[in-house]
Image: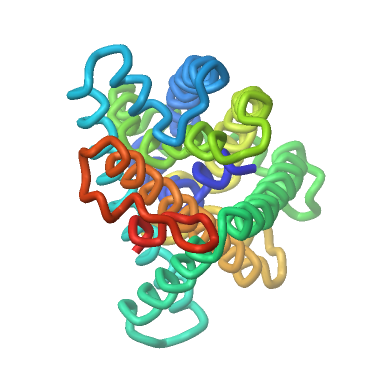
Amino acid sequence: MLALGGVIGAGLFVGSGVVIKDTGPAAFLTYALCGLLIVLVMRMLGEMAAANPSTGSFADYAAAALGRWAGFSVAWLYWYFWVIVVGFEAVAGGKVLNYWFHAPLWVLSLGLMLLMTATNLFSVSSFGEFEFWFAGIKVATIVIFLAVGAAYVVGLVPGHHDGLTNLVSHGGFFPRGVGAVFAAIVVVIFSMVGAEIVTVAAAESRDPRRAVQKATRSVVTRIGIFFVGSVFLLVAILPWDSVELGASPYVAALKHLGLAGADQVMNAVVLTAVLSCLNSGLYTASRMLFVLAERGEAPARLVRLSGRGVPHIAIL
């Protein structure tokens, strides 16, 4: 669940619209290619984490294999990446809340940031508990979407049956050209990064080796089903050129099927996904800072732990 929590966020529920708009019906091929890359990375990282669990994860492995400079560079760059993601997810969450509350975007985004910071400050177990339920909601939603979408495609939804015609009837399968499939890889990789979080958290679990091995095996299958499968259904249900940038194509697909209240429910799920990814981002960024401080590559005060055993200064 933790690996999926880091992966499934606004990048999938909202960002997939950008990929579909830029690529066309072939967008699911981009997700398939990126999924293969993530699978290979997770398999290799899983083997290293099982042999030597570490909060520093791949930063420690890079330092051991290539030298201290590699570990230093990887850790700081990875921390910087998650700082950007945390900001991105907070703003995305604020926009989702704007659907119900007409308040300034910065107020809503700041409120979400403070909420998730408090969760991370409480304890490691509270982070895991929140992430478990957040990820569970997201997974359940995608499973339901896959079932409903598949029923639509095969003609089981009354009054709706486009089949697979949307894959070729709006400019062909590659309306933007074959090159667009590869050009969109950058955007898709951004939405998939996060599966490796489980190797960071494994060092704080009771049985690190078992936790990493189990998560690695499950991520391989779930990324293929949840990402590739759901995006394939999106382009089969919706004409690719009807997708609106900045809006969730999942909401648009459910509205297209005529499901009452689908937009309300899906927006709530998107908010859950954003909070989950924001939660994971704060956790991962703080642990990377903690490891850097422990190695003397960041201010020493960042290594301090609160009474609950969390690196509170690194989180803040």
Q: Residue at x 42, y 37 (%)?
A: 193
The image shows residue 85 at horizontal and vertical percentages of: 34, 51
Please, is residue 194 above or below residue 46 in the view? below
169 horizontally vs 79: left or right: right
The answer to which of 245 and 293 lies nearer the viewer is 293
The image shows residue 314 at horizontal and vertical percentages of: 34, 56
Q: Residue at x 34, y 30 (%)?
A: 185
Please state the total of marks drawn on the protein image.
0
Q: How is the image coloured?
A: rainbow
Please, is residue 23 above or below residue 84 in the view? above
293 horizontally vs 235: left or right: left
The image shows residue 212 at horizontal and vertical percentages of: 60, 27
Residue at the far top: name it: 65
Query: Which image quadrant: the N terminus?
Result: top right
Please, is residue 291 above or below residue 113 in the view? above
Q: Is residue 212 visible?
A: yes
Query: Which image quadrant: the C terminus?
Result: bottom left
The answer to which of 179 and 113 lies nearer the viewer is 113
The answer to which of 282 and 233 lies nearer the viewer is 282
Q: Residue at x 35, y 46 (%)?
A: 290
The image shows residue 284 at horizontal and vertical percentages of: 42, 46
Q: Residue at x 28, y 29 (%)?
A: 183
Q: Is residue 243 visible?
A: no
Residue at the far bottom: name it: 102
